[in-house]
Image (cartoon, rainbow, N blue to C red):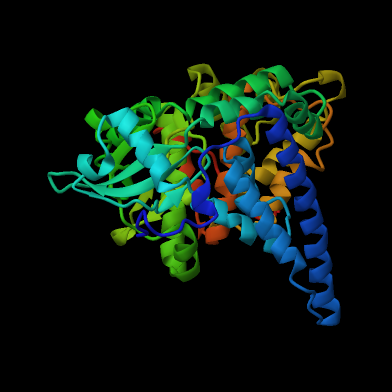
Amino acid sequence: MVSRKQKASPRDEQRRISTSRANRTLKAAAISARLATAAIKSRAADVMERHFRASADSTESRMAASVLESMGEMKGLVMKLGQVLSYVDLNLVPGLREVLAGLQDSAPPMSPEVSEQVIIEDLGTPPAEFFARWARRPFASASIGQVHRGQMHDGTEVAVKVQYPEIAAALEADLRNVSVLQLLASAFNRAVDRGALLAELHDRLLEECDYLREAAYQREFHAFYKDHPYIVVPEVISEYSTRRVLISKLIKGRRFKEFASNASQRERNHAGEIIHEFIFRSIFQYGIFNCDPHPGNYLFLSQGQVAFLDFGCVKRLPPDLIVKWRALIRAALERDRSRFDQLTAQIGFVGNRASFDFDYNWHMFMYFYRPFIHDRPFKFTHEYAAESFANLLFNNKNRRSFNIPKDTVFLNRLQWGMYSVLAELGAETNWRRLILPFLYEGEALPPPYPDGTFE
């Protein structure tokens, strides 16, 4: 802990997040340029190492570190992009992913005085008085807020999530850069409903700035899983939570990187099964899901338990979509191609039917559903996750006619994120046996695909 009399570091001098649209646009453009340059340099360094056993200088490392610092300081949508790039398998050079991984649970924090002022404004008392113990330095910092350790006067240890001042305005500025967001949408495909896409991004991301809403979602998930032997959701201290301060009971466990690096294969397989169950049970049993599966939102506890953190970005699915999505996966597993094509169109994936290649779409989905079609263990790898993503985003023959409906925007983010997380764990199990109960609920199960099919 640093006393008030000590000289603050440059990071500690941060007082305000820029909310100027023009300023944030310029900074985002500078980050994009440095990110691209770092990627080129890192790839060149990789070639030198592999083919000539020569090491390049550390310029690319310094540049990547600079990108990390800038994204962390901007917070908001730019930092969220950095978090996605840090773990979703997009075939980025490993060095860049490793550097950006610092954004998953650690970024330049706001100064202690600023976070304390938020506590005073929202709780009416300085944190040193409100809490029996208060850690001025956060132990985690993210795109919307940072988390401090504290202890209530009754002895309860808590995690106190404090929102960055003016972050809502910063997000609004990012989301008003419609040209940039539309460019991203256009890069995905030409048929996507951009208005719906931008509306969904706007609604979900700005909801994250309301910690009262997040507390309600967290209480809901806590109630769902309070008796589950392996899924843990921290309990909210509701009476003291506000729009900018969220207080939960503290959960202690291993962070993702440390767990993935040191846990046994059996432990990693089990953790992957729990993450998989949390996602599909939440969707098919409760009709709701946490949209942000990035590695910073997990803690790995003893006895095989996994704690799930951060319920700021949550999506409640329309019941009709859940029915159709369940039917779509069932049609794939039952090899009912006609039904599968009908459901693809009914859900809204077909943007232009006249030019839509249903054969390619079938094979694309079957590659994505590969973990579920055979009755045997399947191991998630970075190569498989990256190829699955590329089939949809980069190599998709329906790129100009495939649509992403509004209600599936974050569902897609969840699926690709889950695959990347499971690949980072190297999780291997019989995923088919895990998902079938959520799809059939006691009904007769279809036979698995014969070996050699869609390999």
Q: Nearer the viewer, residue 333 or 310?
A: 310
Q: Say which residue appears at 47% left-offset and 33% top-offset.
A: 165
**Along the line of sight, the residue nearer the viewer: 16 or 169:** 16
Name, please, the residue furthest toward the front.
5
- Residue 328 visible in the shown view: no
Query: Residue placed at 70% from the left, 52% from the top?
Result: 386
Task: List x then y, in percent, for residue 429.
Answer: 49, 57
Image coordinates of residue 31 in percent, x first then y, are: 73, 46
Q: Is residue 410 above or below residue 254?
A: above
Q: From this viewpoint, is residue 177 visible?
A: yes
In the rendered image, the vertical position of residue 262 relative to residue 242, given as above or below: below
Quadrant, the C terminus: bottom right
Q: Nearer the viewer, residue 5 or 309?
A: 5
Horizontal side, residue 345 vs residue 168: left or right: right
Q: Nearer the viewer, residue 348 or 86?
A: 86
Q: Residue at x 76, y 34 (%)?
A: 361
Residue 53 located left or right of residue 27: right
Q: Which image quadrant for residue 362?
A: top right
Q: Is the N terminus in the top left, top right, bottom left or bottom right quadrant? A: bottom left
Q: Residue furthest bottom?
A: 53
Q: Quadrant of residue 422?
A: bottom right
Left/right of residue 161 with respect to residue 187 in the rendered view: left
Q: How many marks?
A: 0
Q: Which percent across, then down, holds residue 397? A: 84, 36
For this orientation, the residue located farthest to the left is 154
Residue 6 locus on image (x, y percent) = 40, 59
From this view, report whether residue 80 is shown above or below residue 253: above
Residue visible at 48% across and 42% down in the picture: 435
